[in-house]
Image: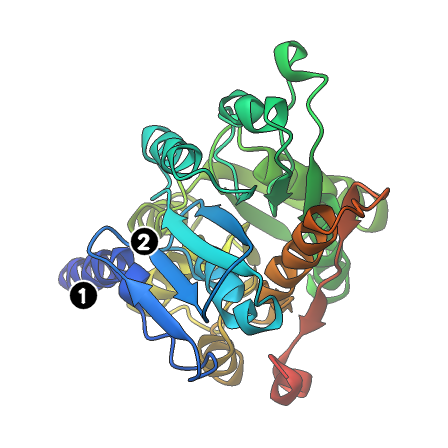
Amino acid sequence: MKKRFLATLMCITMLATSLVGCGNADTSSTDSTAETKVDATGSQEKTTGEKKWKLGYSSLAFFDESCKRMADGFLLYADQFPDFDISVLDGNSDMNTQIATIDTFWNNDVDVISIQAYPGIESNLYKFYEAKKPIIFIDFYPTITDDIADMDWYFVGSSDYSMGEKWAEYLAEKLPENGTVCELLISVGQQNSIDRSQGLHDKLAELRPDVTILDSQSGEADATTSMNVTADWIQRFGADGIDAIVPLSPSLTVGVVEALKAEGLAGKIIVVSSDENPETAKEWLSNDYVSAIQYMDNANLSLKALEIAQACMEGNPPEQREYRLEREMYTKENMDEYGN
């Protein structure tokens, strides 16, 4: 069993390494009349001719499936916004790297900046506000400190608390009496992780007070870490001691699935997830590796951000400052509708 786990760990490490390079992913699904440029640093730019304005988008991390889909969304919908010269940069889930992308956009004099912000870097955007350039946060709700309290900004995302509630509602129907749950946090202190966890805990306590959350551990938004944490839980609580595992982001689910497969427990423990790409989602649901997946095409967040940017640059900034899109729950029964 140990040899099989180590072999799986090596495979998942190789997978994680390959995903880091996905900034050079094929973008052929976008309109062929436009040119997409991708350089060695992971920068992406889409041009269709003469432009009026420049928009820069800083992704939290290309290696995360859902983050990458948001980044790709700006290029996917670029043809609908021909007045924008759109550039996308990878923050690689590192504060200093993402600050560097912000500085790059500032030096390139972009007219609009959109960002899936690493928590704590919001103050680095204040210069854009002072220059009267629209700031559009996407996916992660910003942390606004006193020194930037007067900064204007837009937010496009979903309700992370609601995500936690939806997982709890599903589990409330599926868990046995006195069921047990283990929870994989995205990263300690990360706001979307906090909100998803709180929604899960609150709704489970309301619907199923008999259910126990055995442990909550950080997966550090990393497949290998989540795999190791899951394997540790199996050793601590036993194969029959865990009824469900809740990874709070798709970057964690792959590690959970591989750990359960290595221990011969795939399909025997309920796993719920979110925002997996359609191909992966349908494979996992059909094989019972995952029981239910919340999904929203994250490219829709990018589309809304582009709509806001267009309105701002045309002199009609929206009065509404926050926009939240909802996810749908998919299981084996309705998985054919996933991603459609």
Q: How packed is label 1: few (under 14 Cα within 10 Å), some, or many (20 or more)?
A: few
Judged from this view, the residue extending furthest toward the top is 147
Residues 156 and 110: in front is 110
Q: Position of residue 138 (x, y in %)?
A: 61, 47
Amino acid at pointer 2: Ser
Left or right: 15 as drawn, with respect to 216? left
Left or right: 1 as drawn, with respect to 204? left
Image vertical order of residue 290 relative to residue 149, above or below: below
Residues 263 and 166: in front is 166
Residue under circle 2?
43
Q: Earlier in the sequence, mark 1 or mark 2?
A: 1
Left or right: 192 as drawn, with respect to 171? left
Image vertical order of residue 258 relative to residue 156, above or below: below
Location of the N terminus (image quadrant): bottom left
Query: Which residue: 36% across, 36% down?
Result: 104
Image vertical order of residue 205 relative to residue 191, above or below: below
Q: Position of residue 154 (x, y in %)?
A: 71, 40
Judged from this view, the residue extending furthest toward the bottom is 336
Amino acid at pointer 1: Arg
Residue under circle 1?
4
Q: Are marks 1 and 2 in contact (CB under 8 Å)?
A: no
Location of the C terminus (image quadrant): bottom right
Work out whether residue 143 can be spotted.
no
Q: Position of residue 82 (x, y in %)?
A: 57, 67
Dot 2 falls on a residue whose secondary structure is loop
Image vertical order of residue 235 relative to residue 284, above or below: above
Q: Determine which of the numbered discs, if any, sits on residue 251 in the image.
A: none
Number of residue marks? 2
Query: Which residue: 33% across, 64% down?
Result: 258
Q: How packed is label 2: few (under 14 Cα within 10 Å), some, or many (20 or more)?
A: some
Dot 1 falls on a residue whose secondary structure is helix
